[in-house]
Amino acid sequence: MNERELKSLFCSSLKSNHVKNNDLIPTSEIRIVEEAHFRSFDLLIAAVTKEPDDIHDYGQYNNILVRTQLLKQFARHEKCRIDCIRFYPVEIKSDDDVLDERLPKQIIDAILAFGLSILVLDKNHSKLARNIGKFLPTTLVCYTGIDDHFEVVSRFDRLISSGVLNLKKTILAKVLEGSNTGSKAYSRLVALERIFQKIIFNQLYFENLGMTEREIEFLQMIAGIKPPSSSQEMKKLSKMIKETANAKMTDYM
């Protein structure tokens, strides 16, 4: 079948609760948007849960802080709490579609935007992907070939709120303040990391950076500190170039 037909079947499957092994994607109190988020995703499922997320869970807590603008925008429209909102970006691949190098990028785009990814495959693609699904950072949903019945065959249940933007805070704190890693240095690094994550995420989807006054004040304090001298760095670089200028391959053998 083509993508439109598979998409229609999957939407029907969600509404009729015909997704086997599904403990991730809501099937009630949901709003489904097609060609969502600048057409980055085939479907975007927006769910308003009855119970709020546990903000003491670091992943959920950081997810709300980093994606505040997006969540607030939706919360105003749906008149709900931001900790009751969950987004599920879905990529649909029918048997008429070719699985090529675009797929990893689509999975990564979903993770960067919403912290997770859901991939829905048609019957023939499912036969090939069932064995490798567990190695992909996405929740894999396969069509069974029967009416509107689908099955979750692998689940990637980690909510990625920051990804590669995480700092090695413990190591840096040790460098700055010895072994006392639970003190000021660590907390400052956490704040700095979160501000960077928020800026990078918001500049992808919004015109403003969405920073609070306290975050701006914190960056202004850093801006007032004299950075390491670039001339000293240039001298070090020049020295390194001279030291390696006459290096031969045989020196390393």
Image: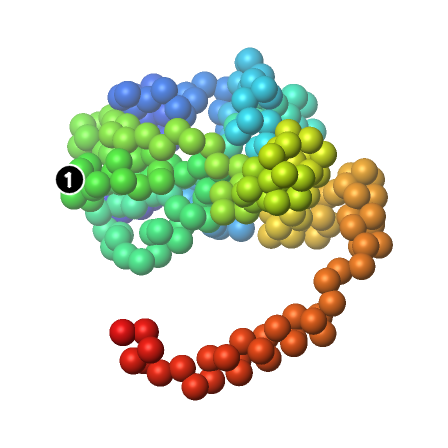
Residue 186 picture location, percent across and down: 65, 36
| Residue 2 falls left or right of residue 188 | left
Q: Name the residue under label 1.
A: 127
Quadrant of residue 251 in the image?
bottom left
Measured from the top left, where is residue 96 in percent x and y? Answer: 23, 51
Q: What residue type is labelled 1?
A: Lys
Q: Is residue 124 left or right of residue 51?
A: left
- The quadrant of the image that shows the C terminus is bottom left
**Relative to the observer, which residue lies in front, 145 or 233?**
233
Residue 116 as seen in the image, left or right of residue 250: right
Could you say whether the residue bearing mark 1 is in a helix, strand or loop?
A: helix
Residue lying furthest top in this view?
51
Residue situated in front as seen by the camera: 13 or 229: 229
Q: Residue at x 40, y 82 (%)?
A: 247
Q: Tell me where residue 106 appears, x and y as whole percent.
A: 40, 50
**Is residue 16 visible to the viewer in this orientation of the structure?**
no
Question: Looking at the picture, how far across and down is residue 193, in whole percent?
Answer: 63, 43
In this orientation, does residue 142 appear?
yes
Splitting the image into 4 quarters, where does residue 239 fall? bottom right
- Give the residue at x 35% y 83%: 248
Q: Which residue lies furthest to the bottom in this view?
A: 246
Rendered residue at 54%/76% (across/down): 240
Residue drawn 50% across and 79% down? 243
